[in-house]
Image (cartoon, rainbow, N blue to C red):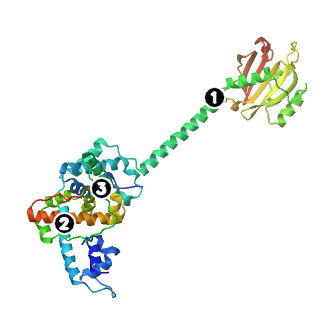
């Protein structure tokens, strides 16, 4: 390295700063600074460059001092903090952001659970259940088995885990069974036993009296106790009650008087 | 990232930022405005800085940009970019430098070409390494050195003429 090259490099050297450890200045400093700790292979100090370097450092420190002496307004710091408190909403830093996100996630999960809960309740309401099973009976359906043996129906229902004859009201045994089906209610089995009431049937009709039995817990807001809740659903008169954990609903096409003899 | 509180950040950086701003504007009110604006921007956008080690250069960069925006509104200077430093820096006469007061030095800084001023101010304030100055000015280190070489040369001329005549002229680009 020539003294001119060293001078060009050291022109940007800031004595007393981190520049003294910057490798970019190391070789030039070896050539210019006699006070520098030198390695075994370091070149000899150039006297002319060394004099120039001393002047550079002195001049630099003098000018630097002028910058360092810039006076700070006494109230600047307080002013910045006051402005911050009065005008700026503190930034949401990541830790706070994580908390906010966790809260939002919690609210969403809660909302989701509540929605699921209420949707579940709405979908499992007794009124909807009644509407669904009545529609089933009034429209096309096929029986799983057709028999006039209530014992055979009971066996079939018991094999499928559906509510069976042990839970049937005694009065229904005066009607003539014609078969049964297990229908689905939100994945739960509901027994539909079809009877003839003794009235004349319309052409193509095989039954005119139906008993539906479900586990009470599968239907929300069903009638409580053995008191009969009478209601008209479409063309069907219905009577519903609960007993021993089961929800019963008896229905027939026509008015309620037909039901009375079976209740 | 759990960075420093706003108060501790202000305590650490408001002085160097103000000095940088004052070096550029030479007006206390403008320097205060720029410093406050910088912290305001930090308060609203600083959370984007993921690496706490980048906080200092982020603040200096923000202040510098704010200064340039203000300056552009006031006037426009022709811009001559340098790629390589091509002249050796003349040394400011130490006697002359000692004899000047701070206002004269800053006035001289204000007279050199605009795009050298920030580099020279950061050079003397010593808050930033060359790498950090490059980040603040958003230019390569080589360009920083080029600007410094030219800027310091112009500053020396300003200070020399100021020392001899008491008046500071303007360097023509």
Tell me the mark number nearer the camera, choosing from 3 and 1. 3
Question: Would you call the spot at circle 1 few (<14 residues within 10 Å), some (14-19), or many (20 or more)?
Answer: some
Instruction: Specify which label sits upstream in the sequence, 3 or 2.
Output: 3
Res B100 visible: no
Which chain letter goes with mark 1? A
Residue at 27% over, 78% down: A4
Task: Kindly state the secondary structure of the residue where label 2 is placed.
Answer: helix
Q: What residue did someone put label 3 on?
A: B79
Residue A57, x across and y down, in percent: 21, 73
Q: Secondary structure at mark 3?
A: loop
Kindly identify which residue carries mark 1. A122
Q: How many marks?
A: 3
Task: Please say if B156 is above or below B69.
Answer: below
Figure quadrant of the C terminus of chain A: top right
Residue B92, given in percent of the width and then of the height, sits at 17, 69
Say which residue label 2 marks. B156
State the mark number for residue A54: none
Quadrant containing the N terminus of chain A in the rendered view: bottom left
Name which quarter of the figure residue B78 lies in: bottom left
Residue located 9% across and 65% down the image: B164
Foreground: disc 2 or disc 1: 2
Say which chain tag 2 marks. Answer: B
């Amino acid at each position: 390295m020539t003294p001119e090259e060293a001078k060009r490099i050291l022109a940007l050297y800031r004595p007393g700063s981190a520049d003294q450890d910057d490798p970019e200045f190391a070789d030039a400093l070896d050539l210019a600074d006699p006070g520098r700790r030198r390695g075994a292979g370091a070149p000899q100090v150039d006297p002319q460059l060394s004099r120039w370097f001393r002047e550079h450092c002195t001049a630099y420190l003098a000018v630097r001092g002028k910058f360092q002496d810039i006076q700070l307004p006494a109230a600047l710091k307080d002013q910045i903090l006051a402005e911050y408190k009065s005008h700026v909403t503190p930034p949401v830093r990541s830790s706070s952001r994580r908390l906010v996100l966790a809260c939002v996630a919690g609210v969403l999960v809660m909302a989701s659970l509540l929605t699921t809960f209420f949707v579940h309740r709405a979908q499992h309401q007794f009124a909807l259940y009644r509407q669904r099973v009545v529609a089933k009976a009034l429209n096309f359906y096929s029986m799983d088995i057709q028999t006039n043996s209530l014992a055979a129906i009971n066996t079939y229902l018991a094999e499928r885990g559906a509510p069976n004859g042990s839970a049937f009201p005694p009065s229904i045994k005066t009607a003539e069974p014609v078969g049964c089906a297990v229908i689905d209610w939100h994945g739960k089995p509901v027994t539909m036993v079809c009877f003839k009431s003794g009235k004349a049937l319309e052409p193509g009709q095989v039954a005119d009296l139906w008993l539906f039995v479900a586990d009470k817990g599968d239907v929300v807001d069903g009638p409580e106790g053995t008191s009969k809740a009478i209601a008209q659903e479409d063309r069907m008169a219905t009577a519903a009650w609960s007993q021993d954990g089961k929800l019963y609903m008896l229905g027939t096409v026509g008015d309620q008087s037909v039901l009375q003899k079976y209740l | 990232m759990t960075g420093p509180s706003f108060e501790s950040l202000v305590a650490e950086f408001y002085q160097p930022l103000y000095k940088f701003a004052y070096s550029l504007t030479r007006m206390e009110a403008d320097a205060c405005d720029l410093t406050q604006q910088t912290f305001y921007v930090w308060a609203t956008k600083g959370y984007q800085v993921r690496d706490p080690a980048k906080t200092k250069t982020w603040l200096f960069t923000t202040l510098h940009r704010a200064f340039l925006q203000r300056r552009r509104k006031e006037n426009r200077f022709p811009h001559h970019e340098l790629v390589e430093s091509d002249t050796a820096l003349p040394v400011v006469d130490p006697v002359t430098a000692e004899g000047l007061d701070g206002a004269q030095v800053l006035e001289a800084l204000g007279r050199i070409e605009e795009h050298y001023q920030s580099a020279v101010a950061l050079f003397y304030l010593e808050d930033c390494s060359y790498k950090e100055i490059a980040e603040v000015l958003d230019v390569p280190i080589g360009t920083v050195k080029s600007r410094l070489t030219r800027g310091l040369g112009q500053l020396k001329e300003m200070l020399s003429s100021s020392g001899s005549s008491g008046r500071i002229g303007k360097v023509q680009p």
